Amino acid sequence: MSYYSFHSRSHVTPNKRYDQQMIRLNKGLQQSIYLLDKFYTKDTISGRNHMTFCVSGTTQNIYTVMIKDNNITCDCPDMKNTGEQYKTICKHCCFILFKVFRVSYADIFHS
Ligand SMILES: [Zn+2]
């Protein structure tokens, strides 16, 4: 399931979800998050490349962001809690997408 799909399974309204995502986008762009390491692995069955990124957050903890099968996930608490509830991606995922890969967030969030 893509985190960008707007098919919400829960009671969460799109506006609330949008607001929650914008908070994380701003943190990902503005806070001091560092890319420590990255590596790619090839899935032997599908032949697809999986990407793994190690990032340090503002709390000095190190989190792992993975891009796999068109999904992006992170092992931080925010992704588990708010991510589960609102179907948002955390600031570490935003950092990877919009600062490292320079994906245009205007295209995604303001279209
Ligand atoms: Zn995270």
Image (cartoon, grey):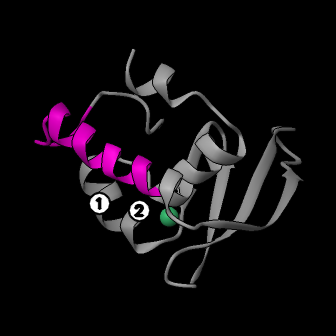
Counting from the top left corner in percent of width and height, residue 80 is at 38, 66
Instruction: Name above or below for residue 81 compared with residue 48.
Output: below
Which residue in the structure is indicated by mark 1?
Answer: 82
Q: Residue at x 50, y 19 (%)?
A: 107
Q: Is residue 67 magenta?
A: no
Query: Can residue 105 be seen from the camera position used here?
Result: yes
Instruction: From the viewer's side, name the closer residue of 25 and 79.
Output: 25
Look at label 1 and name its amino acid. Thr
Q: Which of 38 and 7 is in front in this view?
A: 38
Structural crowding at the residue carrying mark 2, measured as other residues with C-alpha within 10 Å and reported as few (<14), some (14–19) or many (≥20):
many
The residue positioned 39% from the left and 28% from the top of the image is 5
The quarter holding residue 7 reads top left
Asked if the magenta segment contains residue 24, the reply would be yes
State which region is magenta: 8-27
| Residue 64, horizontal then vertical, whole percent | 64, 68
Magenta span dominant secondary structure? helix
Look at 57% across and 67% down and name the residue there: 32
Q: In which quarter of the image is the C terminus?
A: top left
- Identify the residue at image location x=67%, y=36%: 102
Q: Where is residue 103 in the image (x, y as percent from the top left)?
A: 63, 32
Q: Is residue 87 visible?
A: no
CA gap between label 2 and label 1 equals 6 Å
For mark 2, what is the residue?
79
Asked which secondary structure carries label 2, the reply is helix
- Disc 2 beta carbon < 8 A from ligand 1? yes
For residue 10, side relative to residue 65 (left or right): left
